[in-house]
Image: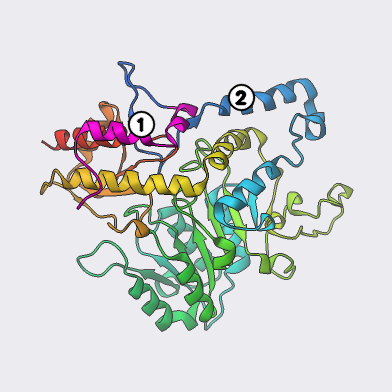
C-alpha cells in the first residue's frame, strides 16, 4: 500500500506538516508575468538565489568602497582568509576533514588540476574509466588529458555502458569491468549522480574496488553535492570536484570545490600546477622564486579567491548548515517519491521515468523520457513550470528540499499531464 494519497488536499497537508517548509521563504522564487510564483523544479541546473545573498555581497562592496586594499586585512570578513569561511561547512557537507577541502576555481578547471596530479599513465596502466554519457565537459577534459600524455582516447578511454535496452548502469557491471580491466586503469573518474538519468552511484564501493586494483579514484560530484549524503574521507577516493551553482545555490558560474584525501596532504612529490595562493602562507609574501605548497587541498590553489563570487555561496551554505543534510535528504526522498507516485497515478504511453525507482539509487532528480517532447518542455516553461530538456528525449525535474513544496510537485504533475494531452 502506498504511503501517499492523490489530490491537492494531501499535498497541502504534507506542506503543513513539513518541518523544513519555512526555508522556502529564504529564497527568491521566479514569478510568471501574471505575478504568481513559478513551479521551479530546475535546481539541478541552477539553484535559486538566497535572499541573503544580496546582503552578503553588499557587505563586501561596502568594505571595498570604504577600505580599498586594506579590506584584505580589515574588512568585516577580511579577504585574505575569506575562502576559509566556507571550509568547515563544506567539509561537513561532503563528509571530509577540513584540510581535505578547498573552495576554488570552477569544476572543469579543478578537474584538470586534479588530473595533472593524479593521472600519471604508463605503458601498462594508461586507461581512464568514465561512464558513457558522462557530462560532455568531463569527456572533453578526459580526452584532452589522454592526448596530452601522448595516448589515444580510442585505446585509453574506457566507458561504462548500460546493457542493451537499459538506460542505467548495473552495479555488477561496474564491478566486472573494474575486475577485468583494473590492471590497465590509471584513473577511475565517475560522476556521483549521472546528469542525464539521475542515477546515483555507490561511490564507497567503487572506491574500494578501484583501490584494490591499484587504480586512482576520483569523482565529479556536480549533481551529488548538496543532493545526496557524502562521506568522502571514509570512502577514500583520491580526489573529487564539484560546482556550487546547482544544489548549493551559489549563483551562475559560482566558485567550485575540490577534495584531496588526507593521505596526499604532504605528498610534495605529486606533480601539480602551481600558483601563489597554493604557496605556504607563512612565506607567501616573501615573494621567493621557489614554490612550497601548503599541506592539504589548499596546496592546489592558484590565485586569490574571488570575494564577490564567494559571498552568495556563503549565504546558501549558512542555510544548509542550519537545515542539516540529514533532514534535507529525508525530505528529498519524500518529494521525489511523491512525484513518482503521482505520475504513476496518471500512466501514459507518451512518457516513462528512466531514473531508478529505488530511493537509494537516486537523488532529487527525476528524468522523464518524452519522445519528441522538447515542445512540451517549452510550453511548460512559458506557463511558469520550469524543468529542463536534455537531448534527445529527456525532461529533467528536481524537487529541491530547501525550497520546493509538496504542492509544487502536485501542480507540476497536473501541468505536465495536462500538457501531454
Q: Which residue is mark 1?
A: 16
Query: Where residue 224 sits: x, y (%)?
Result: 45, 53
Q: Which residue is mark 2?
A: 55
Query: Where residue 326 sits: x, y (%)?
Result: 48, 49
Determine whether 92 is above or below 20 in the image: below
| Colouring rule applied to residues | rainbow
* Visible residue check, residue 395: no
Q: Would you say 293 lies left or right of 59 here? A: right
Q: Would you say 417 lies left or right of 59 here? A: left
Question: Residue at 77% across / 29% down in the picture?
Answer: 75
Kindly indicate whether the residue at mark 1 contacts the one at mark 2 (C-beta within 8 angstroms): no
Determine whether 193 is above or below 21 in the image: below
Question: Residue at 15% across / 33% down in the picture?
Answer: 418
- As drawn, the residue found furthest toward the top would be 34
- Quadrant in the picture for the C terminus: top left
Q: Earlier in the sequence, mark 2 or mark 1?
A: 1
Give the spatial CA distance, label 2 vs label 1: 29 Å
- Checking the image for residue 411, the label placed there is none
User: In the image, is residue 102 part of the stretch drawn in magenta?
Assistant: no
Q: Would you say 162 lies left or right of 191 here? A: left
Which of the pair 121/73 is nearer the observer? 73
**Figure quadrant of residue 289:** bottom right
Which of the pair 184/98 is nearer the observer? 98
Sort mark 2 into few (<14), some (14-19) or many (20+) by Cα contacts within 10 Å. some
Badge 1 marks a residue whose secondary structure is helix
Q: Nearer the viewer, mark 2 or mark 1?
A: 1
Q: Would you say 59 lies left or right of 402 here? A: right
Sort mark 1 into few (<14), some (14-19) or many (20+) by Cα contacts within 10 Å. few
* Image: magenta residue range: 1-28
Query: Where residue 19 sits: x, y (%)?
Result: 43, 37
Question: Residue at 60% across / 49% down in the picture?
Answer: 90
Amino acid at each position: 500500500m502506498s504511503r501517499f494519497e492523490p489530490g491537492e488536499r494531501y499535498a497541502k497537508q504534507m506542506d503543513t506538516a513539513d518541518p523544513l517548509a519555512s526555508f522556502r521563504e529564504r529564497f527568491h522564487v521566479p514569478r510568471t508575468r501574471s505575478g504568481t510564483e513559478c513551479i521551479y523544479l530546475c535546481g539541478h541546473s541552477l539553484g535559486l538565489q538566497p535572499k541573503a545573498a544580496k546582503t552578503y555581497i553588499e557587505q563586501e562592496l561596502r568594505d571595498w568602497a570604504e577600505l580599498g586594499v586594506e579590506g584584505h586585512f580589515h574588512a568585516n570578513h577580511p579577504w585574505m582568509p575569506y575562502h576559509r569561511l566556507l571550509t568547515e561547512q563544506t567539509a561537513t557537507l561532503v563528509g571530509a576533514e577540513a584540510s581535505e577541502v578547498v573552495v576554488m576555481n570552477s569544476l572543469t578547471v579543478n578537474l584538470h588540476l586534479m588530473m595533472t596530479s593524479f593521472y600519471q599513465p604508463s605503458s601498462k596502466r594508461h586507461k581512464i574509466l568514465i561512464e558513457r554519457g558522462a557530462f560532455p565537459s568531463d569527456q572533453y577534459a578526459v580526452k584532452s588529458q589522454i592526448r596530452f600524455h601522448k595516448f589515444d582516447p580510442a585505446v585509453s578511454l574506457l566507458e561504462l555502458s548500460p546493457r542493451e535496452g537499459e538506460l542505467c548502469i548495473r552495479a555488477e557491471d561496474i564491478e566486472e569491468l573494474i575486475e577485468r580491466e583494473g590492471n590497465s586503469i590509471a584513473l577511475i573518474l565517475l560522476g556521483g549522480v549521472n546528469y542525464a538519468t539521475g542515477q546515483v552511484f555507490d561511490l564507497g564501493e567503487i572506491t574500494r574496488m578501484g583501490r584494490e586494483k591499484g587504480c586512482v579514484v576520483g569523482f565529479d560530484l556536480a549533481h551529488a553535492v548538496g543532493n545526496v549524503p557524502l562521506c568522502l574521507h571514509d570512502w577514500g577516493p583520491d580526489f573529487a570536484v564539484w560546482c556550487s551553482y546547482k544544489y548549493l545555490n551559489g549563483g551562475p558560474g559560482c566558485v567550485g570545490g575540490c577534495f584531496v584525501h588526507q593521505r596526499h596532504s604532504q605528498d610534495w612529490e605529486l606533480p601539480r600546477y602551481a600558483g601563489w595562493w597554493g604557496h605556504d602562507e607563512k612565506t607567501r609574501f616573501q615573494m621567493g622564486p621557489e614554490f612550497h605548497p601548503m599541506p592539504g587541498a589548499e596546496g592546489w590553489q592558484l590565485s586569490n579567491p574571488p570575494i564577490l563570487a564567494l559571498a552568495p555561496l556563503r549565504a546558501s551554505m549558512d542555510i544548509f548548515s542550519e537545515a542539516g543534510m540529514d533532514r534535507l535528504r529525508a525530505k528529498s526522498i519524500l518529494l521525489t517519491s511523491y512525484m513518482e507516485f503521482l505520475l504513476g497515478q496518471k500512466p501514459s504511453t507518451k512518457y516513462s521515468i528512466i531514473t531508478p525507482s529505488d530511493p537509494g539509487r537516486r537523488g532529487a532528480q527525476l528524468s522523464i523520457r518524452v519522445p519528441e517532447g522538447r515542445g512540451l518542455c517549452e510550453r511548460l516553461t512559458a506557463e511558469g513550470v520550469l524543468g529542463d530538456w536534455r537531448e534527445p528525449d529527456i525532461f529533467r525535474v528536481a524537487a529541491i528540499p530547501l525550497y520546493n513544496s509538496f504542492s509544487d510537485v502536485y501542480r507540476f504533475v497536473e501541468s505536465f499531464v495536462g500538457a501531454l494531452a
